[in-house]
Amino acid sequence: MDTIFGCTYMVLAPEHPMLDKLIENSPDKARITDFVREVRNETSLERVQTTADKRGVFTGRYVTNLINGRKIPLYIANYVLMEYGTGAVMAVPAHDQRDFEFAKRYGLPIEVVIDNPDPSSRGAGGGEAISKAYEEDGVMVNSPGFDGMGNREAMEAIADHMEKKGIGKRTVHFKLRDWLISRQRYWGAPIPVVYCEKCGMVPVPEKDLPVLLPEGVEFRPTGESPLKSAKDFVNTICPACGGKARREIDTMDTFVDSSWYFLRYISPNADDRPFDTTDVNNWLPVDQYIGGVEHAILHLLYSRFITKVLCDMGYIGFDEPFKRLFTQGMIVKDGAKMSKSKGNVVSPDALIDKYGADTVRLYTLFIGPPEKDAEWSDRGVEGAFRFLKRVWTLQEIMEKAPETGDADAKDALLRKMHQTIQKVTEDVDGEFHFNTAISAVMELVNHVYTGLNEKGEECYDKACLKQVIENTVLLLGPLVPHIAEEINERLGSKESVFCRQWPSFDKGMLKADTVEIPVQINGKLRGTISVASGLAQEKVQEAILADGKLSAWIEGKQVRKWIVLKDKLVNVVVG
Ligand SMILES: [Zn+2]
């Protein structure tokens, strides 16, 4: 629409129904008909390939570009398909590469109407000198009344103008290929239609549905519907007049079924109808769709289409089948997509035999953000196994722990635990970031082991460790169910880990356990001190005096005043 002033010729698809009439009296009729016959031998795919030769023939007719009253030639071309829109397109060679190639070949005018901001693209001789079509956004030129506007803005302005003048109106075109219906193959649902010599096409009445596929049919490719050979199936009687009739022998593609199976899942026992509207409206739409990117243009499109139709017909009360879409990445190994032919497929069975199902689950979830492709690593599996062993051993450590431990160590560990609960809760809820959730639990477990190493084996008391293990197990439950359930039971829980409440975190415990406080001496920043957050003033003073670098500024002088802003700043006034 924005490029309408640059339309220098029109093209019809060779299959266009108006063509015969248009060329009826043309002296060139034979040549045009030959061209049409030739193009019809090419597949749609061949014709729309960008590399394909753009060929066409002039019809001898002209049409008027209503925006500027200009008379422009009407062509037929192989690159325009009847399946797209109306089978008639305005050609704008300066801004569409296919039109550009076609115009070059047949010497048609090329007129720039959206300015390419790159000056090197502009040839000295005006429009014809451009070396390829400019298909991006830009500023309008050579479009009287709209020059200087951005092309997006001009689209609306031109549509307004044309509607006001009564030479055009806005419409939306929907396009869905109908290849789901009428496949010449065996598998797929039969189309419930019969053909009667007297009554014509008659739908199979509801009481006779579903029409089942006949068995024992030869379905080697012959170019014809395999059901044709199943005489018992084909020959039937007309539901309307009782006379001889034939069944439809094409089938529906399996996509027809997969486009609404989620409705059937709600009512698997409804024998007299596809689904129960009340139940379906109670349970659906589907909360979460998870699939590979290959579904984005087929399954999602068809299921949305069918849902919208069923909604319009009043069978269901929603017009989108899925509330949320998540597209997962692929697992690659040795740089290639796993495939049997490449011999780089990882067998989960072998890994499960060696490490157990939990390890394989954990590693698969840990491998990376689920929306991204990820590289499989056998060493990574080993790492996941080691981590689970460390989780398992925590319980033995707890059994040997003292009743009372180090208060600071306990405080730091519990802070870490609450931070971990918060992180995992946020990461797994909705975003599926299991990898970072697992990473957080690993940090928590490491914190325990590091503490034991650095502060001694008696640093954590038994109750504190038990609390940490319990929460670790609850957080890991959905990810590694078997080991989580086992540890949960060994801790004495009577309730399955899956029936227990998801852990909650204490907001007051989320703050970092240590803070970096800037230290000034007489108002000048001389360094920082790292202390436990909320530490009392005397303790902060002690820490500063014990710090070699900071105390050097104070040594030999009289401290006149300590100015301490808790957790924020210390200023020592000396003189
Ligand atoms: Zn009949």
Image: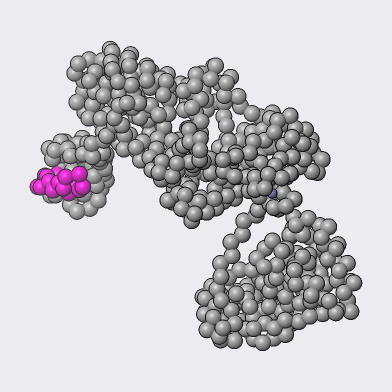
* Location of the N terminus (image quadrant): bottom right
Span colored in magenta: 557-572
> Taking the image as drawn, is residue 222 in sight?
yes
* Relative to 81, residue 128 above or below: below
In magenta stretch: residue 569: yes
Choose top left, top right, bottom left or bottom right for residue 544.
top left
Q: Is residue 90 above or below residue 322?
A: below
Give the percent coordinates (x, y) of residue 382.
Answer: 51, 23
Whole-percent x, y for residue 359 in the image: 48, 23
Residue 182 in view:
no
Left or right, 228 with reference to 90: right
Residue 289 within the segment the image draws in magenta: no
For the residue pair 344 and 214, the one nearer the viewer reads as 214
Q: Residue at x 75, y 57 (%)?
A: 44
Q: Could you say which is closer to the camera, residue 572 or residue 9?
A: 9
Q: Residue at x 62, y 56 (%)?
A: 176
Query: Would you identify the image quadrant in which residue 169 lies?
Result: bottom right
Q: Nearer the viewer, residue 257 or 334?
A: 257
Residue 173 relative to residue 413: left or right: right
User: How many numbered badges does the structure rendering display?
Assistant: 0
Q: Position of residue 152 (x, y in %)?
A: 54, 73
Most prominent secondary structure in the magenta stretch? Answer: strand
Residue at the location (26% across, 15% down)?
401
Residue 146 in the image: x percent, y percent? 56, 83
* Residue at figure coordinates x 54%, y 50% from the top left: 306
Residue extending furthest toward the left: 560
- Please name the colour scheme applied to the rendered image: one colour
